[in-house]
Image: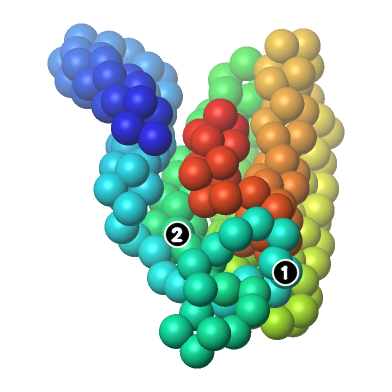
Amino acid sequence: LWAVFAVFGFILLCYIVMFFIAENKGSRLTRYALAPAFLITFFEFFAFFTYASDLGWTGVQAEFNHVKVSKSITGEVPGIRQIFYSKYIAWFLSWPCLLFLIELAASTTGENDDISALDMVHSLLIQIVGTLFWVVSLLVGSLIKSTYKWGYYTIGAVAMLVTQGVICQRQFFNLKTRGFNALMLCTCMVIVWLYFICWGLSDGGNRIQPDGEAIFYGVL
């Protein structure tokens, strides 16, 4: 985990240098593009420092006894699993920046020249609120030891599905995103669902240890 933290630290330093160079000499578009990338890297740097330091977590009794977790002081089985809530904080801060970056890329490279600022704000607002909702849903679900956690998981998944529908409508029909940008957008949308799969294997299903969970999320 310290290796992942170091990678994010190196990338962060690179972004800091590029950010200040762009602020002084770069174009407006370059500044707009670097700012969210810099912030995302900073938030993940913060999250993985907390992860690697074994901080920013709370203990919740696991629903399933698939992997060995710490024994409860009451002797209950399954035992207590570490829930690293710090990663949800990083997601909460990072995803709006990524959505802005996607919108910016499509607005500047799409085939539609008739772009309304109000339409952009309207679409981004829905996308951001929907994304933050599924992040909070997974956080709440991870803190519940009973089967009810899967209810929050399902609610979050439905919210993400609706949000992705809004993103597709905005990107492919309004902004007419095509080519490489469309491919990257589809890749990003698939990666989101890998977050849900990882959650199901870790905080939800207790199939993988917290270290494996951190590596999984780090790769994503």
Element under label 2? loop
Where is residue 139? Give x, y as percent: 56, 67
For the question of whether residue 31 can be seen, the reply is no
Q: Earlier in the sequence, mark 1 or mark 2?
A: 1
- In the picture, residue 7 is in which quadrant? top left
Q: Is residue 151 above or below residue 85?
A: below
Q: Residue at x 40, y 20 (%)?
A: 29
**Colour scheme:** rainbow
Q: Which mark is residue 84?
A: 2
Which quarter of the rendering shows the C terminus?
Answer: top right
- In the picture, residue 190 is in which quadrant? top right
Q: Which mark is residue 64?
A: 1
Where is residue 82? Give x, y as percent: 48, 63
Task: State left or right for residue 187 relative to residue 115.
Answer: right
In terms of depth relative to the viewer, which is nearer, 51 or 25? Answer: 51
Task: State left or right for residue 45 relative to residue 163.
Answer: left
Q: Residue at x 57, y 50 (%)?
A: 209
- In the picture, residue 27 is in which quadrant? top left
Which residue, as the protein is rendered here, is positioned at the far bottom?
74
Element under label 1? loop
Which residue, as the protein is rendered here, is positioned at the far front?
75
In terms of depth relative to the viewer, which is nearer, 68 or 92? Answer: 68
Q: Which mark is residue 35?
A: none
Where is residue 108? Give x, y as percent: 57, 20
Where is residue 37? Give x, y as percent: 40, 29
User: Closer to the camera: disc 1 or disc 2?
Assistant: 1
Type of the residue with mark 2: Phe
Mark 1, other Cα within 10 Å: few <14 / some 14–19 / many ≥20 = some
Mark 2, other Cα within 10 Å: few <14 / some 14–19 / many ≥20 = many
Q: Residue at x 22, y 21 (%)?
A: 13
Q: How many marks?
A: 2
